[in-house]
Amino acid sequence: MAWKMSFDYDERNDVVTATFEDCILNNALDVARWRTEVESYLSRYPSKVDLLINLDGLVVKYTAGRVFGRERSEVLARYTLRSFRYGGDEMTKMFVSTSGTINGAAVNVYKTRDDALAALLADRKAEAEGRPSLAGKRAG
């Protein structure tokens, strides 16, 4: 299978969903490719977006983990208001969690898209009401 990613806009919920297929990050070159492609998609939106990230199909290997964490944090800060994740293998979820702690990026990992969307919408509502985020750190 070939490396593939897509970013689909959900107009009803005003959220973009990122989906990955066979995006295996083994080293810094893979991470650079990932960042370039993600930025090419997210830069098409006129402003920062709320983002749901399907971690299934995105595999971060130990050898790419540290670089991925730094790059992920920078991309999210630049292109997103808030980001919530779902799915994924244990290693990738560990790197997302660790990099979130180290770099101050949102972690917010849920089991399903529906769970992640519900958390994002609740966070958006809390912000609109002037209450603190219900899900922790925001992406940007």
Image: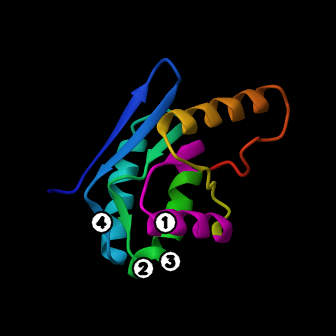
In the image, residue 113 lies at what x, y percent?
48, 37
Alpha-carbon span between mark 3 and mark 4: 15 Å
Label 2 to label 3: alpha-carbon separation: 8 Å
Q: Amino acid at mark 2?
A: Tyr
Say which amino acid is labelled 1: Glu
Distance from the alpha carbon under mark 2 to that under mark 4: 11 Å
Q: Are marks 3 and 4 in contact (CB under 8 Å)?
A: no
Q: How many residues crowd around disc 2 within 10 Å: few (fewer than 14), some, or many (20 or more)?
A: some
Name the element at disc 2.
Answer: helix
In the rendered view, would you say 130 is above or below 91? above
Front: mark 3 or 4: 4
Q: How many marks?
A: 4
In percent of width and height, residue 101 lies at 67, 67
Q: Residues within 10 Å of mark 1 (few under 14, many from 20)?
A: some
Q: State the image coordinates of residue 136 (x, y, percent, origin top left).
A: 73, 50
Q: Which circle's residue, 3 or 4, is located before the other in the chain?
A: 4
Q: CA distance from mark 1 to mark 4?
A: 15 Å
Disc 2 target residue: 62
Q: Is residue 83 covered in magenta?
A: yes
Between label 1 and label 3, give the one nearer the viewer: 3
- Tell me if label 1 and label 4 are in contact, CB under 8 Å: no
Q: Where is residue 70? Give x, y as percent.
A: 53, 69
Residue where numbered disc 1 is placed = 71
Residues rendered magenta in the picture: 78-102
Q: Which residue is mark 4?
A: 24
How far apart marks 1 and 3 lie (CA) works out to: 9 Å
